[in-house]
Amino acid sequence: MKKILSFALSVVLLISCITVGGMNAFAYKLADVPTVNLGDTFSVNAPVLNVDEDMDEEDADVYFAKFTPEVKGYYEFVFDTGFSGKDDEAVMTGIYSYKQQDLICYALCMKVPAEMKELADLLGVTDSYNVASELNAGEDYALVVMNETKKALTANVTLQTHTHSFKTYNERAFVDGEDMDFNWDGEKYTGCTVNNCTYHKTIQTYYSVKSVKLSKTAYTYDGKTKKPAVTVKDRKGNKLKKDKDYTVTYSKNKAIGTGKVTVKFKGNYEGKVVKNFKINPKGTSLSKVTAKKKGFTAKWKKQTKNTTGYQIQYSTSKKFTKKTTKTVTVSKNSATSKTVTKLKGKKKYYVRVRTYKTVSKKKYYSSWSKVKTVTTRK
């Protein structure tokens, strides 16, 4: 998953770098782009751009044809060659709108690992330089070619009207199981399969997953398996359906420790989320708290089964605020009492106890017992 996300980020960064680098250069050549007409074939010789260095005017040849359609419709720039670069190379072609001052479509050409083809398709990675989009009558557009290979890109390009070839696509919503920051929508839509055309008509949207919550995140050990219910909601607040949109499996959900719930998405969603919950030891109760000189002795019911030890907590505040509270750990599970000294005389203290069990160097605590009070002797 991290490898896929790393690839996705590299694509986004590449688009940003090329766009930013190109935009720095646009001001040099935009006014001088030669005009072409519908049906024309013209030559492109795109030099190598290095977006890591400042580009001077000679490096700024990113615009190659200006076109102003007379009729609103779909048009395309068709190259007589395709991408054949190496793994560390890329070419981006696009149609630039003078009015919007931005690319209205693009084709990002680069090589990707086979296992990432689905993600590459989602991000618009292709091996064709051809671009097609709907253009407005009377507005100016320019063909952009940004070359980050090792040599100049030479091609003949034809400007022509575009004919659609429609196809229904179903892209699943993606669920990132680590921090859910990279979740994104999926959708069913009609698109065009020809020349990286921008035609897109949404049929149905699968909204990204916003939350995966357990009905309970802490249990008390009783020897039985624990299976907290799972609720999954999308970013619109809609509940996803178990077994249709996701499956749930449980592991390590019986013994004291950390139980796991694995939510694996299916259907119109993909990805996996793992949620944890705790199974804590059974607690105990205070049987007596006896006042001592500037101290007290707490006694509790022995709880040796599934217990490593105990914690006694005392405070001058019934709310056990942090500044007024002290905690004493008793590491023997066979112990049944603890004397606390060096306290203030004639002072009221609130006392409670809980058990703990150490599993794989981690402590799991029971809930606190009911509170007893004691006033120390002077």
Image: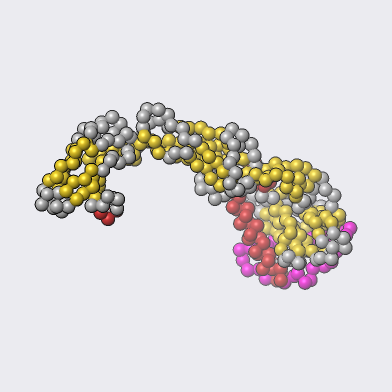
Quadrant of the image for the N terminus?
top right
Work out whether residue 334 or residue 214 is closer to the camera in this orientation and state it: 214
* Secondary structure predominantly adopted by residues drawn in magenta: loop
Q: Residue at x 17, y 52 (%)?
A: 347
Residue at image coords 70%, 41%: 170
| Residue 333: % across, % down | 24, 34
Relative side of 296 to 239, left or right: left
**Residue 33 sits in which quadrant?**
bottom right
Q: Position of residue 6 (x, y in %)?
A: 57, 49
Q: Is residue 139 visible?
A: yes
> Residue at 75% of width from left, 48% of height from top?
201
Task: Name the one closer to the observer, 215 or 121.
Answer: 215
Q: Is residue 85 visible?
A: no
Residue at 30% x, 50% y is 319
Rendered position, 96 above or below 112: below
Nearer to us in this view, 20 or 45: 20
Quadrant of the rendered structure where residue 225 is?
A: top left
From the top left corner, tell me how far across and down residue 261 is, in percent. 48, 36
User: Residue 361, position in %: x, y?
Assistant: 33, 39
Residue 204 lies in magenta, yes or no?
no
Task: Using residue 190 as the reference point, say whether residue 180 is left or right of it.
Answer: left
Question: Which residue is at the far top?
Answer: 223
55 is within the stretch colored magenta = yes
Magenta stretch: give its range.
Answer: 28-56
Left or right: residue 15 compared with residue 283: right
